[in-house]
Amino acid sequence: MKSEFGLFGLGVMGKSLSRNLAQKGFEISVFNREEKGTEEDVAINFKKAHKELETAQAYSDIEAFVNSLQTPRRIMLMVNAGKITDLVIEDLIPFLSDGDILIDGGNSNYLKTKDRYDYLKSKQINFIGVGVSGGEQGALIGPSIMPGGNKETYNLIKPYLESIAAKDANNLPCCTYIGEEGSGHFVKMVHNGIEYVEMQLLAEVYTILKAMGNNPDEIANILESWKPEADSYLLGITIDILRKKDGDDWLVNKIVDKAGNKGTGNWTTIATAQLGAPSTLIASALFARYTSFYKEERLLASENFNINPSSLDLDIQDVLNAYQFARIINHYQGIKLISEAGRAYNWELNLSEIARIWTNGCIIKSDFMVELIPILKTDDNILKHATIINKLKALKPSINKVVSQCILNELTASCFSESVNFLNAYTTSNSSANIIQAQRDYFGAHTYQRIDDDDTGKFHHTNWN
Ligand code: 6PG
């Protein structure tokens, strides 16, 4: 009997998704190359190790794998994003038939997804780019899924993706058709950008609470007490992390302070610059990771500049308020970036639905995300909404205090600082951009508009000297 769905690549995510599909009762085929040198049949061993895979077909031969599938074939690629995706596509093409569907479930760059879509279309193969969030555990018990591409093609894989996805509070799948081209991967990329900021904010909270004299257990207890107001998946795992002991010490104290990355934060920062959207927190969070990587230079600089952060004098409530303030700005900026991309690429995006599928299964799921679902039904700009305005107004004195204290005590909190700077800039009705315009006109005759000219489309030039 032929299988209805194929999974190509049995890395951490591929294995979890295969098991998830099999647990839902789908007939699947899985493929993995034999491990070089060991001749270990990864696919067969994987099948043997899990009861739910009893009826699954396991292959290490591409042709046999493809031929084991019903047509049109549905093949989900779970391979490392980048060059490997293209190599795998080339390996599969000779065995595919018109109308078959390749689904890329990796963290691929959205521009590459569009190129792959066009290339495969010329070969009569359908291509869907799918963002999958939730890590190993999420993929197994239900991830959040962001599919983009042709809608009719999507409908042919929809039942599979919807049944393996996490469920929201109303038992609806955390999977929705995002839009054309690479929109699914774009939305996943921004998900990761928001994730970078949420992680960085928690790291900054740790910096501040530590400087207030708390040890990791005490910080974990403080964060635990924030759950009723600020619960999120990332808050929860940070509490677990802080409590983890290694011998007599806490494990976090032994982890080298150099933050890695796999590229999605970098792409989000490039996209925000290209689209002219000021997602400043995402850039700050990314650059905080890059700065952390200059470990040797930082060690030298800490001696050269002799900076000794002193202890902070703050109320815990102010730290929580500052954290909540910065998270609102983060979500505003991330969602705005998605909305700008929708406009630029003519994707018809439903922002409220995107927030909904981010309420479970994914890394940025949070109570705040649930609050955003109705808000995003009316506007892409959450900062126009009365409840958000009132919240930010109430939280602002705390973030002013926390950021000032950090600066006066020589502590770095780049996303906290950037969030308050952003709101200060965003709420300035008469900014200093007039100076920039005059400077541009002075040296480059780039022209400027005048506030006393009724013709708003008219540009003026002055002979400044
Ligand atoms: C998710 C995660 C996942 C992964 C990223 C982040 O949604 O499940 O975002 O995609 O953790 O690769 O990676 P970096 O922090 O290494 O860039």
Image (cartoon, helix red, strand yellow):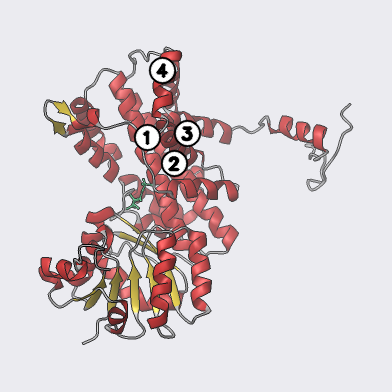
Label 2 and label 4: CA atoms lie apart by 30 Å
Q: Nearer the viewer, mark 2 or mark 4?
A: 4
Q: Are marks 2 and 3 in contact (CB under 8 Å)?
A: yes
- Identify the residue under disc 2: 330
Rendered view: 123 above or below 51: below
Rendered view: 34 above or below 254: below
Q: Secondary structure at mark 1?
A: helix
The image position of residue 54, as x and y in percent, is: 12, 75
First in sequence, mark 2 or 3: give its number: 2
Is any atom of residue 232 visible in this view?
A: no
> The residue under label 1 is which amino acid type?
Leu
> The residue under label 3 is which amino acid type?
Ser
- Identify the residue under disc 1: 201
- Identify the residue under disc 3: 419
- Residue sitting at the far front: 37
Disc 3, ligand 1: is the CB inside 8 Å?
Answer: no
